[in-house]
Amino acid sequence: MEKQIGFSSHCRKYGLSLWQCPQFLFFIMGIFIILATLTSYFIGSRYISDPLLVSLIVILLVLVLFVISFIITQGFERLAEANRMKSEFVSIVSHQLRSPLTNLKWTVDFLTSSKIEVVAEKKEDYYKILKENAARMGELVDNLLIVSRIEQGGMVSKKERFSLEELISEVVHDFFPFAIASNVKIEFSPTAGLPNIFANKYQMKLLVDNLLGNAIRYTKGGGKVEISLLSKNKNLFFKIEDNGVGIPLDDQKYIFQKFFRAQNAALQQTQGTGLGLYIAKSVAENAGGKIGFKSKEGKGSTFWFEIPIKPR
């Protein structure tokens, strides 16, 4: 009974009954292997005179049954995980879309209502609300399309040689109004004479966009975001450091998962789809590089990635 209760919590994670749960099935298969092993041993010892041969038959049978049970259980677990992720995907996307849709509906109803007279000066504010929420839904849809291409192996695309330093400068310039509005200062300090890289320019812009956007979004007013770029071991090494809210230690292992947002980040009530870091990691790895971070809650975060200068 205690064992069943222990399995129940794991099964609830996938939304499955006990007899559909991979962990419980593996447990049952383990019992079956033990019984089959004992049975084969008693039968073999009775009809086969050589004890060494009996032992070899029993060991072989155990190995075959274990491999079969492991393969079956892994298959069930993949199906269960896919089912869980599908349900989670629908729930999160619905939640992400509900808020901007509600704001859009409320604003349109307010502007078109004949019962309420809207002051002309205030109309611009309401139009701004419409624009922001439409942009928020557009961002979510764009990110979902990118994630879909990533998971279908569609990230491979045309590559070219370009200056990563110039691309970062362009992204910093694009984010300048957002930084000013957030009262955050951006400093970019590249090393002189950096070589060009060979990669997909659009994807690299996505990578820098997501890291810089997060750094500004989760930095408190009056904070600072520092960006550096240097050459390191035949790679270009990018680092972005902020003094924002940081990431709790317990949340750090999930930070590159889809739709994940740290608890303290969610409390900031900032807009975000929870897909940015997943996309950033996929882009870095697709370019033959890697990405990582270090963070301390309440002190800030430092994210980095390195991309090979020459194609591998």
Image (cartoon, rainbow, N blue to C red):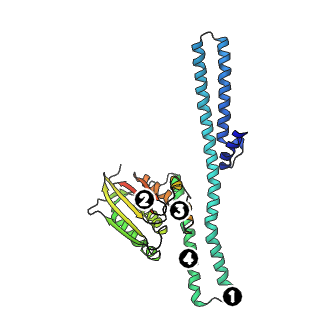
**1 or 2: tag closer to the N-terminus:** 1
The residue pinned by badge 3 equals 143
Mark 2 and mark 3 residues within 8 Å of each other at the beta carbon: no
Which label number is shown at residue 116? 1
Distance Cα–Cα, label 3 vs label 4: 18 Å
Distance Cα–Cα, label 1 vs label 4: 21 Å
Badge 4 local density, few (<14 within 10 Å), some, or many (20+)?
few
Residue drawn at the location 49% of the way across and 59% of the way down: 277
Q: Secondary structure at mark 3?
A: helix
Q: Secondary structure at mark 4?
A: helix
Look at discs 2 and 4 and give the one toward the viewer: 2
Look at discs 1 and 3 and give the one toward the viewer: 1
**1 or 3: tag closer to the N-terminus:** 1
**Looking at numbered disc 4 in the image, what kind of residue is underneath it?**
Lys
**2 or 4: tag closer to the N-terminus:** 4
Q: Is residue 28 above or below residue 205?
A: above
Distance Cα–Cα, label 1 vs label 2: 49 Å
Percent x, y of residue 100? 61, 71
Q: Would residue 296 appear left or right of 273 to someone viewing this image?
A: left
Foreground of the two, 270 or 130 = 270
The residue pinned by badge 4 equals 131
**Residue 273 in sight here:** no
Residue drawn at the location 60% of the way across and 44% of the way down: 78
